[in-house]
Amino acid sequence: MNRRTVLLLTTVTGAALLLPGCTGTGGSAKGAEAEAPDDPSKVGGTITVLTVRTDLVQDGTMKKYAAEFNRTYPKVKVEFQALTDYEAEIKIRMNTDDYGDVLLIPAVIKKDDYPKFFASLGTAAERGKKYRFTDFTTVDGKVYGQSPVGVMPGFVYNKRVWKQAGVTRWPTSPAEFLADLKAIKAKTDAVPYYTNFAAQWPLTSWTYVDGAVHCDPQATTKLAEGDPWAQGADLRVGDTLLYDIVKQGLAEKDPTTSNWEQSKPRTAKGEIATQWLGTWAIIQFQDAARKAGVNPDDIGFMPFPTRTDGTFCATVGPDYNQAVNVHSPHKEAARAWIDWFTDKSGYDKDNLAISPLKNAAMPEVLKPYEEAGVKLIELDDSAGARVKLIDDRSEIGIYKPEYRQDLVDLARGAKKGSLDDFLGGLGEKWTETQADVSD
Amino acid sequence: MAHAHTHPPSPRAGQTATGTGRPSAKDAAPAPAPAPRRARTWRLLTPWLFLLAPLTLLITFTYAPIANMVAYSFTDWDGVSPDLHYTGAENYAEIFTREDLFQVFWVSGYYLAASVVQIAAALYFATILSFDIRFRTFFKGVLFFPSLVNGVAIGFVFLYFFQDGGTFDTVLGLFGYHTDHAWLGTPVSANVSLAGVSIWRYLGMNFVLFLGAIQSVPGELYEAAELDGAGRWHQFRHIILPGIKPVLTLTVILSVSGSLSAFEIPYIMTGGATGTETFVIQTVKLAFRFNKTGLASAAAVVLLLIILLVTWVQRRLVPDDRVDLV
């Protein structure tokens, strides 16, 4: 019996050892193209579109888009799958061939591997003429994804509360910003700043101060080559501001039990004054205002409080990029959906977002930006893959919430140490890893 | 045999039918063999046939993944990329040379302490409720109820519970105790709170185990003991405790391994923030946040080995001797 058990276990182990060899998706379909169909009436098939917008799938908005799409492409049937924990679920599914026909490119896929998982949408030279953000998904001159909306990080704030505190113009430096938050604390009942510590991901968006601080389109390249927490570096400026906000008691009293869903109506009603998020959040906060019966126009949006040569700067970047599964049997139909959804669906306008089309106008909500002459820049992402590699390898996680949770804990005294040591330690770890990562 | 009439009888059938002649050794020797051999094969096979379904499930969902995990622990796989490299024992070397990976085990101390409280409480309630008292069944239900609730739901409920001005503060306020304490705010307070939730969650399971064990103690023993003038404490000390020793040992083993691998409550409630990260949360983060599936697998294997080791040591310290009450 004993010997048999051993034999059984050996067989199982042996079989399992062979398994890793079969994970992933061979190279057979590598380099496939998803070409745009010439004749919309001829292309057919059922395609599955994966999305993170559970809300839009549930309330039927996505179905409406599909019905509209069918007017041009009558033979294509579009089905939606909304994944709540997208990154984790898709990562496992991508070990098979079955991960929808159209999907959002997950962060876990290395850029070099894009051709193994996705069909190309065309060359960068050709697509770059019409669309923004092409270099975020370009590998060897070919583009693998297209974001339907552009997003811009910034502070979502309640205009009424800020006015009540006597602040009528955007702060122009971190010190001024802190002074304004203090005024809010002194003169109103609102929580000046809400970290959304428990939801974790809102802290991650502090990484997107990168580029805005010094108005530098090469900011991502600097992350790959230098110390992000060196004196005056973008991330240090951002992280120091977050630290100071919490340290000076300008954030919510107990960040550990903060609640994202509740923070929306509370901001709309003026119980919370400010949150660092992105343009995508504006519509959600306006909806929350409508539901709470307060004026949605109270929701304002402001850039990071620094100026370069007298002007504010804001970075515009892609949201999730849509791509065609390289194993999809209906690549033409899938491509048709991506093109239609990007160009004609109106999804960008419905979300008050920046259009990925180069010739489109800015959304209405960004009028104050135009008036204030905020300079919009697009970051060069050619070093983006390397930054992600350094980030994972070093386990720092600038695109993950942990280190900022530690930063907040440090600021409110739940963790011992000084800010300088903390940021210095991160910088040391980062630059050490840089040396190890060669590509 | 339906074919007996149409076919020539088999030698054996012929012999018995005619009843003549002594069966020669040559004829007889191979003859009895087929039937018993087939029967023996069947007899050997039958239990395995019954075991086929559970074994398939066990192998597919327990041993194959474990074997897979062991295999991944020797690679640098990121969890999704088609290519992965064999890196030998590098991951294990990293685990044992990186101090920070083991620091999180201190957090298990809180859960270990909690399980002592938990076992004591479960034992206390099980003893009391095994005697005849009023509303016995009701209290049993109350104690067991948390075990029926989904762990994720419990996490969310307690997140509200510990919120600033949440249920806990309200309840304390009812007793005139107004605290301004952020329960999940500091590492010590957060870990104590989480361990408290863990006690609440798993108490019912231990309680039911103890109750079952106590009730298997023959009732006459109590009667006899009472006649001899033994009080409740003596009954507990000399009858119940030795009577349930094997279950007690098992519970301690389960609690220790549970404390080392605490996961869902801290993961849902704090995500490991503010010094509440346990070893399993750390492993999950390595695998899914930093895409180091290889290293995370190695960490999981190490945890498995640690738990096996702890269990083995415990078994050596407390041998599983027979219960002999009389």
Image (tube, rainbow, N blue to C red):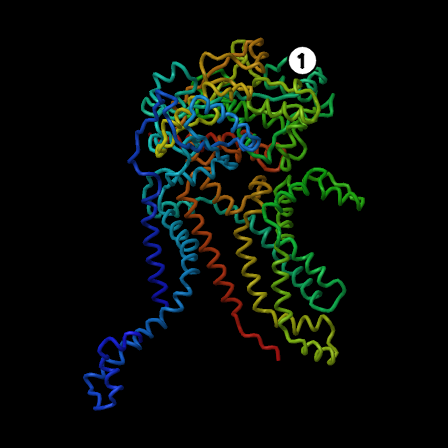
User: B170 above or below B1?
Assistant: above
Q: Is residue A22 left or right of residue B185?
A: left
Total numbered badges shown on the rendered structure: 1
Q: Residue furthest front?
A: B6
Whether residue A225 appears in this view of the structure is no
Whether residue A272 appears in this view of the structure is yes
* B44 vs B264, nearest the viewer: B44
Q: Which residue is mark 1?
A: A168
Identify which amino acid the numbered label 1 is placed on. Thr
Quadrant housing residue A112: top left
Residue B264 in the image, given as x and y percentages of width and height: 56, 47
* B89 vs A199, nearest the viewer: A199
**Residue at figure coordinates x 64%, y 57% from the top left:** B204
Residue A403 in the image, given as x and y percentages of width and height: 52, 34
Q: Is residue B121 left or right of residue A379?
A: right
Viewport quadrant of the C terminus of chain B: bottom right
Label 1: which secondary element: loop
| Chain letter of the residue carrying label 1 | A
Crowding at dot 1, Cα within 10 Å, few <14 / some 14-19 / many 20+, comes out as few
Q: Is residue A6 left or right of residue A304?
A: left
Q: Residue furthest right?
A: B176
Quadrant housing residue B56: bottom left
Residue A434 in the image, given as x and y percentages of width and height: 39, 30
Residue B185 in the image, given as x and y percentages of width and height: 64, 39
Quadrant housing residue B237: bottom right
* B155 vs A203, nearest the viewer: B155
